[in-house]
Image: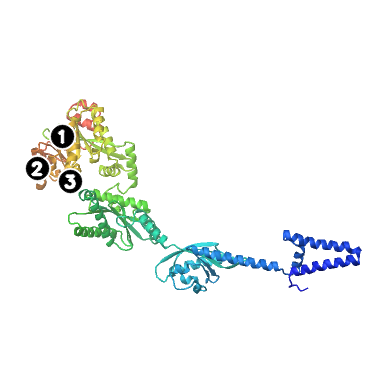
Amino acid sequence: MNRQTYIEPAIRTIVGGFIVACGVLVYVQPAWSWLWLSILFFVGFNLFLSGFTQFCMMEKLLKKLHFRSELDEIRNLNRAHAEAEARAAFYDTLGLLNEVVIELSRDGRLAFLSDHWLKLLGIDSRSDEDFVGHPFLSFINRQDRRVLETLLDALLKGERDTMSLRFRMLREDRHEHWVEGKFALYRKQGEVQGIRGVLRDVTEAHVQEKRISHMAMHDALTGLPNRTYLDERIAEAIERLGRVGSKFALLFIDLDNFKRINDLHGHKTGDQLLASVSAILRANLRETDVLARWGGDEFVVLLPFSRDADIARKVAGELMRKLQLELEKQISDTFVTLSIGIAVYPDDADTSEALLVQADKALFYAKSQGRNNIQMCSDLQTRAPGFEDAEMTSRFVAAVKQSLFQVYYQPVMDAGDHGRIAGVEALARWHDDKYGWVSPATFIPLAEDMGLINEVGRQVLEQALDHFSQCSGVCADLKLAVNVSKRQLMSVDFYPMLLDMVRRYGMSPRQIKLEITESIALEGIDKARTYLQRLSEAGFTLSLDDFGTGFSSLSHVHELPFDEIKIDISFVRRIKTPEGRVLVKTIADMGHAMQLALVAEGVEDAETAAILRELGVGMLQGYHFGSPMPKEECADFIAGLRSPLLASAGAA
């Protein structure tokens, strides 16, 4: 029997033969009939059973002998047809998607492309089949090609199972199109055939992500980088420049009196000014410099350099000059100045946060020096001890919390009676375990900057009232002078707190003199008058401190309810010169005309005291009469001038 014949004819022949043979044998040899009938029964039963179970032992036996079945051929054809239909349905499904499925051979050539490949390349006139066999990397942007090639090689070497990458495709329209590709090995019967990938156009999403990222890192008004971006650039500069030993500077720039521009011209004008300032600063910096808007009217410049640190000061000065020139052309009715603080890495600090703190301190000092100037952090140690020291700040805060401030008193003498004391001025003093006696010129600006001036003023006032109340019976005619800052005076709770404290210590408002600087006039005459009038009506004496050095004019004095003018030490020290004498005489004559009391501070010798008496100044204060002293010494001083009873009071 030929092995290529079909099983079914063989089975039919065998079955027929068995039946004929069984009939013959039964007829010829009845004794064997049981054997042939058993064989016939076995064959028939298997054929019958296979009709229900699809399992036939005879068929399996013939297959072992390598005979083929027509049924097998039919099954194979059906299976191939089903696979073809499934593949066609799969391709149809791919056609519904925006993704492109590709297969790459082991040498990186395109072996299969799904629909939308042409759309991905921006081509209409060609067929997908035209690209089969071409190297896949030839369609990738040259800048992204090497990275993609490296990753595909890693896949083929088995170093990775899958990989994803965003890259740019070369298109006929030459527009930049971003594609996100996901790739995996393609195997058949366990053998690596190549790589299969899915490509998706993500150009719109990529552009949107870049836009969102830009918004997160840049200021909406000026378009400049913001704090987040600046922090990253500073960290990068520290890492990069630190390795090669180079330096960079941070310039903290603040527009002087920007709030007044907003108040006078409106916020729209203020926004236009900020946009103009940012454009001018950017135009006068190098591409390697980073200009960022820190917030409000503050800007920061990251300035790399390799030479002497003084170059930062020169750049800052040039920025100030260029800005003023340009803004004068654009905004003729507004004069804008800058205050700039500079810190240098690594000279002033070696971390991003510390460097920003040091630059901010230098800026604060620049503003405290009258604005429109440049200060470097390295200069603060000699010019303003305490500003450069972060520990000083923390120790000052601790001193405020622990009420460590002391009150010293300086006598104020009656100029008409050489031995008569008119009152005392309470002065804040701070002794620190590390720094010793810290000058008020250092810690008062710290208190102002940190918003602690109200608390410091309250502590000093309470101590002074406590000390003074202990001897009020003997010193009923003495005035206790205390300094009140503008921020204290404008505080909502200052007036009720002051009245409550005075009553609590059993004193009268008429025993208290409040010394207020003329910067109060910056708040506006009407507003200042409201605050001061309430204190005056309560019975407090109001003294205009440091007269002539602040922002108000002489004409403002008569509009505010002051009782006294305190001539600043800067005028008193020049009184021996003709010009200085004229200035003090002018102030004294004005005070007399307005029926205001006059006090001169900084009197350090008898000649100065004599000139002031001659000009009609009624009260004198200074080292010529007595330096600031603790309460016990002040009590002894007053006792020596007046009554010995005061010496036992133990207070001033």
Left or right for 142, reference 253: right
Type of residue at label 3? Phe
Which residue is under mark 3? 551
Colour scheme of the rendered structure = rainbow
Q: CA distance from mark 3 to mark 1?
A: 28 Å
The disc label shown at residue 413, or none: 1
Secondary element under disc 2, as helix, strand or loop, is helix
In the image, residue 414 above or below residue 390: above
Give the number of the mark in front: 2 or 3.
3
Q: Quadrant of residue 567?
A: top left
Which residue is under mark 2? 585
Left or right for 57, reference 254: right
Q: Residues within 10 Å of mark 1 (few under 14, many from 20)?
A: many
Viewer-proximal residue among 315 and 155: 155
Type of residue at label 2? Lys
Residue 507 in sight here:
yes
Type of residue at label 1? Met
Secondary element under disc 1, as helix, strand or loop, is strand
